[in-house]
């Protein structure tokens, strides 16, 4: 569990009522900035309740929750705290050559654990960040599907009692959407931080060759996402660096590994920059590196939220199940599916 101890030590929680132009520490600040920037970039097709300053601030704060709830004991820690990272070697295999490629993940996390164990690898040290992102995305699709049904039913319902219940349940679902978007944002944010995707998560690994003489300091991770990022992270800079949406041909099972592999590709540039003094006071190279990583996380979170909304239109929800499209078209009454037959 040494990987978890390093991650916990790197987190600095700073309570802020809002996100100012400059804020302190990646552990809290990085996640806040990614959540806020992503929500502020959502297009008009998303529900209005999600495109408000309040929603942006709320998701920014809730994106910190998976860090704030670490250390609850077992089985909590095994099932949650190892979700923040996936340690890959330089070729993109989990842990080392015995692990599977990030591009060939098993369908289920249980199958992933079993394969690593069979290979003689410690699943706690490996982490399972890709599954946390995929699970979070799928939960958000379900949230949006439920909201669509409640919103449509509330608008059409003529019975005052039922209409009042639909409204109350819609408001409950909106709170859950903010919470679940925040949790997804946390893991997406972790996936943008190079140290969360590599065996070189806190200084270059001493278990493999180090031909370029990179630092092996066990202060590397915390220094990068702590004091240094506190000096340079700005919301306006992150927003300006965000890429355009990339949603054509979306495939979740391919998208998540590609995102993590792209972050893994930044590990070597990070260590070369560190060796060259790029994170020294006043050097713009280090600032630009941090901003680019935060912007990558915000861009990915924005895209996943938008795609989850779009996917929810083709979903079915409740019991007995109702198709979202049919409820929105007014051809199906969802009362029993939403309120319950009993």
Image: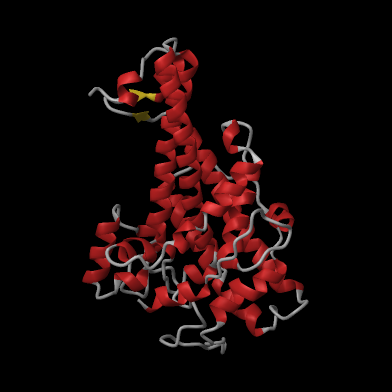
Residue 252 in the image: state x and y as whole percent. 43, 47
Report the residue at 41% width, 66% height from top: 86
The image quadrant of residue 267 is bottom right
Q: Nearer the viewer, residue 308 or 92?
A: 308
Q: Could one spot residue 41 in this view of the protein?
A: no
Report the residue at 62% width, 50% height from top: 36
In the image, 61: left or right of 40?
A: left
Residue 144 in the image: state x and y as whole percent. 46, 34
**In this picture, is 23 found above or below 98?**
above
Residue 67 in the image: state x and y as whole percent. 47, 63
Q: Nearer the viewer, residue 273 or 47?
A: 47
In the image, 165: left or right of 235?
A: left
Residue 152 in the image: state x and y as whole percent. 47, 20
Q: Residue at the top extreme?
A: 158
Q: Nearer the viewer, residue 34 or 72?
A: 72
Image quadrant holding the C terminus, namely: top left
Q: Residue at the right extreme?
A: 282
Image quadrant holding the N terminus, namely: bottom left
The image quadrant of residue 3 is bottom left
Report the residue at 41% width, 86% height from top: 207
Q: Nearer the viewer, residue 168 or 133?
A: 168
Report the residue at 46% width, 87% height from top: 209
The image quadrant of residue 75 is bottom left
**In this picture, is 207 found above or below 284?**
below
Q: Could one spot residue 295 in this view of the protein?
A: yes
């Amino acid at each position: 569990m040494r990987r978890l101890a390093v991650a916990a030590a790197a987190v600095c929680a700073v309570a802020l009522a809002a996100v100012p132009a400059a804020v302190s520490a990646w552990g809290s600040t990085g996640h806040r900035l990614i959540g806020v920037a992503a929500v502020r970039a959502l297009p008009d097709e998303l529900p209005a309740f999600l495109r408000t300053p309040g929603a942006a601030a709320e998701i920014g704060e809730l994106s910190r929750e998976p860090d704030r709830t670490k250390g609850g004991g077992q089985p909590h820690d095994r099932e949650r705290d190892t979700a923040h990272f996936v340690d890959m070697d330089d070729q993109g295999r989990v842990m080392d050559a015995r692990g599977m490629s990030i591009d060939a993940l098993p369908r289920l996390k249980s199958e992933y654990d079993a394969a690593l164990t069979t290979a003689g690898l410690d699943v706690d040290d490996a982490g399972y960040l890709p599954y946390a992102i995929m699970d979070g995305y799928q939960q958000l699709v379900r949230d949006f599907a439920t909201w669509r049904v409640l919103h449509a039913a509330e608008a059409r319902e003529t019975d005052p009692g039922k209409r009042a219940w639909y409204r109350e349940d819609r408001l409950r679902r909106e709170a859950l959407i903010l919470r679940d978007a925040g949790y997804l944002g946390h893991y997406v944010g972790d996936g943008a931080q190079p140290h969360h995707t590599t065996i070189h998560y806190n200084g270059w690994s001493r278990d493999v060759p180090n031909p370029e003489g990179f630092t092996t300091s066990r202060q590397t991770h915390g220094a990068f996402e702590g004091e240094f990022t506190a000096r340079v992270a700005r919301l306006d800079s992150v927003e300006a660096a965000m890429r355009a949406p990339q949603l054509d041909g979306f495939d979740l099972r391919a998208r998540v590994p590609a995102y993590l592999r792209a972050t893994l590709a930044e590990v070597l540039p990070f260590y070369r920059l560190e060796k060259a003094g790029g994170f020294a006071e006043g050097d713009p190279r280090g600032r630009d590196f941090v901003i680019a990583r935060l912007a990558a996380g915000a861009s990915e979170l924005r895209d996943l939220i938008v795609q989850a909304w779009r996917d929810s239109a083709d979903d079915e929800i409740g019991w007995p199940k109702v198709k979202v499209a049919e409820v929105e078209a007014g051809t199906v009454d969802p009362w029993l599916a939403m309120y319950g037959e009993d």
